[in-house]
Amino acid sequence: METQKQELENDKQQLENRRQELEQAIANQEQEEARSRYKAIRDQADRITQRIDDLRDELLTADENQMESIKGKTRQELADLARLEDWAEQAQEWIPLKERVKEIFKKHGFTMVAVLTGVGAVIGTIASFIFRTAGEILGFLGRNAWLLIVAAVIFVIEKFKEKRS
């Protein structure tokens, strides 16, 4: 009887492990499909953006009759682009945050090295300013110790006056 209970527990554990593996596989598949959809949408958005740029170039050389037609096409392309951006946003929800951040950096021409270098430079500048200023203050106080003594005496006298009144 005890052996059967143990076997049932083992079977139950194996089924649970298998269920978790399948759930992970489904999640991975959904993420991969979302990545593919997102990439296809971004590619289409890039093509529309290029067409809009071409239409703007045409607009510069167009006569009055052609201008309205080109403006209408541009409005339609912009509407399509907005729709694609909405779809991309929906598809992006299934993509892990790490990949979304990478996509943002890639889209805007950033690299992690550039960001880290910039952050390091800012931190270095701030630290340099703080240490330089602190050094100047300590140097001033070292050369003018009498000023510190006078300030301390005035402080003590003021506190004494407050207590007396």
Image (cartoon, rainbow, N blue to C red):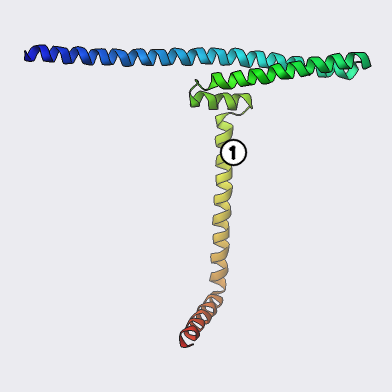
Nearer-the-camera pick, 40 or 9: 9
Name above or below for residue 97 compared with residue 161. above
Q: Visible in this render: residue 63? A: no
Residue 61 lies in what quarter of the image? Answer: top right
Q: How many marks?
A: 1
Name above or below for residue 9 compared with residue 108. above
Residue 88 lies in what quarter of the image? Answer: top right
Rendering coords of residue 46 (x, y %):
68, 16
Nearer-the-camera pick, 160 or 114: 160
Residue 132 as seen in the image, left or right of residue 58: left
Quarter of the figure with the N terminus: top left
Helix, strand or loop at mark 1: helix
Farthest residue, direction right = 64
Q: Visible in this render: residue 21? A: yes
Name above or below for residue 96 compared with residue 39. below
Farthest residue, direction left = 1
The residue to which callout 1 is attached is: 118
Rendering coords of residue 60 (x, y %):
88, 19
The 10 Å Cα crowd at callout 1, few under 14, some 14 to 19, many 20 or more, is: few
Rendering coords of residue 52 (x, y %):
76, 17
| Type of the residue with mark 1 | Gly
Residue visible at 54% across and 77% down in the picture: 151
Farthest residue, direction bottom = 164
